[in-house]
Image (spheres, rainbow, N blue to C red):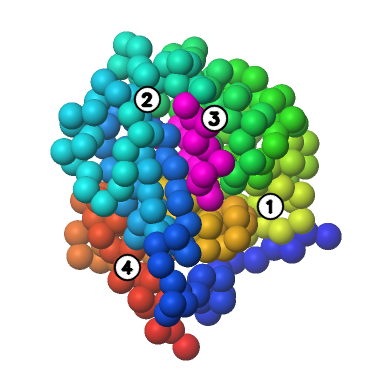
Amino acid sequence: MINKFSLDNKKAKEILPERPENANKGTFGRVLIIAGSKKMIGCCELAVSGAFRCGAGLVTLAFPDCIYDTVTLRLTENTFMPLPSQNGELSKECIPELLSEINNFDCVVFGCGLGRNSDIKEILGELILKSQKPLIIDADGLNALAEGVEVLKNAECDILLTPHPGEMSRLIKNSVDYIEKNREKVVNEFCKEYNVNVLLKGNNTIISDSKATSVCINKTGNTGLSKGGSGDLLSGMIAGFTPSLKGDLFKAGCLGAYIHGLTAEAVSEELTEFSTLPTDCSRTIGKVIKDIIESE
């Protein structure tokens, strides 16, 4: 039997990780975000900000070395892992360095703005097969995965996929129309077949655990989130919560989606849904979390 639910502030407060007084930055976990390319740099800033604003103690950005000057000028709180690149995107030459470092982190995000060169699929495959840390796959990571989704069946780590309907369409080789008409069924079947958590974006985002035994229907958000960069922010937010939730990607996905939606609602009250930007949502995360903490 499937446990289906939605979050409200009371339930979100119950999931929200505690912040012990005797903590240090290591207490709240190390997040690795593998993102960016010469054509897509802003995603790095959004994902990093999402992770920090949702509690991560340390965030490292791994990115193509060809964008080093731009990225390091824009970001200040995180550390950097420049990696070998080719034609403005990551090269598979980065695999040995990534594999040597990956298990030093508590959660990994892969895919935001990486581009679609053939090396991305190979890099992702190595992470899926050899990393033991919770892995969030988004954006171009999902596009790479669609070329060989069976690799998920041999994963060594817990995985959360965060597709929009178009990306889900490529993963299951079916139409967006079919997915939109059968959202819960599609997610349920995919989770069972591949033993992964899935967050299917859209109106009433669906988050399912890897066994399809618990499903959260997210009721927050509005069309202000229909902007490039919103997904990058969400992936970072989920990663930020994951270490303090003891690696539970399902809980982190539920909480991240709920708060992500509330930020858009809060921003659009002042700026309208037309003018809400992911950067506005990022700056509003703290206020939303404060409201949840103070709720009865």
Q: How many marks?
A: 4
Other residues around mark 2 within 10 Å, as few (<14) / some (14–19) / many (≥20): many
Q: Is residue 30 left or right of residue 46?
A: right
Pointer 3 or 1: first along the chain: 3
The answer to whether marks 2 and 4 mark residues whose Cβ atoms lie closer than 8 Å is no
Whether residue 107 sits left or right of residue 91 in the image: it is right
Q: Which residues are magenta?
A: 97-113
Look at label 3 and name its amino acid: Leu
Residue under the point 41% across and 49% down: 236
* Residue 152 located left or right of residue 98: right
Measured in 3D between alpha carbons, the distance from the residue under mark 3 to the one under mark 1, in whole angstroms, is 26 Å
**Counting residues from the N terminus, which is met first, the one under dot 1 or under dot 4?**
1
Of pointers 4 and 3, the one earlier in the residue sequence: 3
Question: Which mark, residue 286?
Answer: 4
Does the rendering let one see residue 190? no
Which residue type does callout 4 highlight? Gly
Task: Tell which of 247 and 141 is nearer to you.
Answer: 247
Any magenta on residue 34?
Answer: no
Q: Tell me the residue that label 1 is attached to.
A: 209
Position above or below: 136 against 111 = below
Give the x, y percent position of residue 113: 37, 30
- Label 4's element? helix
Give the camera-side residue of 193 and 135.
Answer: 135
Vertically, is 181 above or below 122? below
Number of other residues with Cα within 10 Å of mark 1, as a class: few under 14, some 14 to 19, many 20 or more: many
Residue kind at label 2, given as amino acid type: Leu
Q: Residues within 10 Å of mark 4 (few under 14, many from 20)?
A: some
Q: Nearer the viewer, mark 4 or mark 3?
A: 3
Residue ID for mark 2:
83
Q: Which residue position is annotated with label 3?
A: 99
Q: CA distance from mark 2 to mark 1?
A: 32 Å
| Disc 3/disc 2 C-alpha distance (Å) | 12 Å
